[in-house]
Image (cartoon, rainbow, N blue to C red):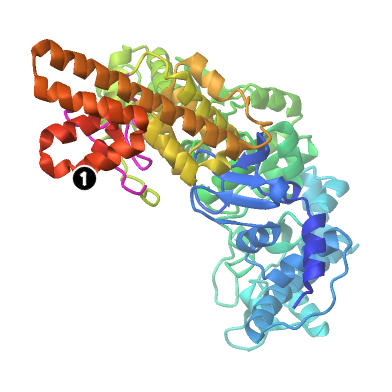
Amino acid sequence: MIPDDVIAQVRDAADIVAVIGQHVQLKRAGTSWKGLCPFHGEKTPSFNVIPAKQFFHCFGCQKNGDVFSFLMELEGKSFVEVAEELAGRFGIVIPRIEESPELRRARGERVAMLAMNKLATAFYREMLADPKRGEPGRAYLARRGVLAETADRFQLGYAPDDWGALADHLKSRHADLELAVRLGLVAHRPRAGGYYDRNRDRLVCPVIVPGGEVVGFSSRLVGVPSPAPDGSEPPKYINSPESAVYKKGKLLFGLAQAREAMHTQKRAVLVEGNFDVITLSQAGFTEVVAPLGTALTIEQVSVLKRLTERIVLLYDGDRAGYKATMHALQLCIEVDAEVLVASRPGHARSGGAGRLSGGVDPDSLVAGGGAELLREAVDRALGGIEFFAFEVWGKAGANSDARARALEDAARLVAKIANPVKRDLIAGTLATAMDVDLGVVRNALARGAAPGPAAPHRGPQHPNAPVPAAPGSAGSPPGGHPDAAPATPKLVAPPPMDEIEVIALLADHPVLIATVEADRAFWLLTDARLRAMYSAARDGQSFLELAPAQLPPTTAKHVLSGKYASAKDPPASLAAMTQNLEARKLGAGRIELKKSLADARRRGDHVLARELAQQAEAAGRGNHELVTKLAEERKAGSRTEKLASLVDPETSNRKQVE
């Protein structure tokens, strides 16, 4: 085991915000930092990092821990691997330790795979530099306009047109060739036995992850292909197979090189292929990444959303590029990522429709001297929804059936947007772009949302939470409960200021959400919007999105003003606010009791008046004693129970669900 004092030394040296910030885009929220959780798909930030405690917590999936557990969970590494990695980063020496056989075996396999990939990378780079054997690879790079420094930055290499060059090299280094088979570097000869190279006469692009490790390869054929031993024609591109270190659906080519620029530029430019990334990066587009030989996945989009603010789609201008653009657009909208679509220079606009000019790809444009024009196109990229509206409507023309289908396609896409305010704004954009009545668009959106996605799994239910009734229905308690769906109540007046202050405090200190004190405050909120907001926040949603969607603009601005960000003792402030709400509630109960007493006397109901007078006197001595007495008298009949509800409506509401 690693000594505790060494673990503490590493933990103290590792700035948890800086470490996690390499994997998640964090924004300050009071004394903590917030971002999108890397462990589960979410659209609003519920992942919190508290630097004062060197701790992280996700209110959505409930994962929490320190800097060690974060990296263990994210990268699938053992505690020892993470500790050694952090110690090496901060110059701390860790003594040798003993591991269990299982951990040693798993760790050894991962280390061996990465070492094998490193060995192969070095071999391919040596081959590219070889005056004779590397000439085809260098000629190919010259034709593509790739400079030597760019090749070095991406660690590009060349696999010579030789059936056993890498296999022989690995043998000479006493490497495990069966491991090389699992990594897709070599394959078994079907008849003669032994091994042959999978990459032959190919420009090899290592897939490098942040941290510098090579986890796989993507290679491109350079010359005329020769048949494989089994007679099949080799593909134009070859990607590494899935392994313990290579998950192509979760990885992006160029991410290690682009991550810093993505943070600085606050955007990621997404292109189709490896050479688009390489040539655009050389031209100054250092924030460019690409999927690895497959269609874009929701996991890849989620990675980009965590690391930067917006995604710019810059796919090829042919039909396949258009389909890829529309697919990526839908995924970005599904995870609520800000998405833009860049129109290529010379991009035709026929009838308002943004059609990609056929066959034009970013790599070719840069090679033809169009880097500045392309940069302008990226900087002026069109909002994803606007692009979609122009595309589907432009293709519909004057055909009414086609226009109806186009509107329905757009509506199905927009229906994926969770934020109701954003949906309303986009409905207006669609109406303008398509030159149709706003009501027609809203009707299409309503149809596009039906039957609607399955309700998401809610978190653990609040103790004694009442069952929510339809807004305005008879017998429904005010608001809802911490697990009720955050429907937007149709209220115009702003909520009571003392209740707004509670939500403002929780917005600045989300670690207080779902605590006993916060739940106490929830039961005292009278405004349905605030109750719905707390319910949603308790399920992991962000007040940053909830406030503008649920509250009047001035109220939302107050909630998000950060006035409590520097509070010295937030839990104490919450307790004081809760006490104020309780005092207000008691005062309101007494006022209502006095009104009922006056009404009973006016109607001449002396029995009720006498009982009300007794309750008013008891309330003056303390509400707790009154509630206790009323609980003992509940068997006496409904009149006493009605009196209890006047003094303590919460007690009555809770009884309804008991």
Does residue 422 appear left or right of residue 504 in this picture?
left
Viewer-side residue, 607 vs 535: 607
Q: Quadrant of residue 369?
A: top right
Residue drawn where x is 36% and y is 43% of the image: 483
Res 611 visible: yes
Residue 308, image x and y in percent?
65, 38
Query: Main structural element of the magenta stretch: helix, strand or loop?
Result: loop
Above or below, 554 relative to 540:
above
Viewer-side residue, 553 vs 21: 553
Does residue 636 appear left or right of residue 540 in this picture?
left
Residue 181, image x and y in percent?
64, 77
Viewer-side residue, 410 vs 469: 469
Residue drawn where x is 55% and y is 19% of the image: 557
Res 162 visible: no
Please tell me how crowded label 1 is: few (under 14), some (14-19), or many (20+) other residues with Cα within 10 Å: few
Residue 471 lies in magenta, yes or no? yes
Above or below, 625 relative to 472:
below
Q: Quadrant of residue 186?
A: bottom right
Which residues make up the magenta segment?
Answer: 462-490
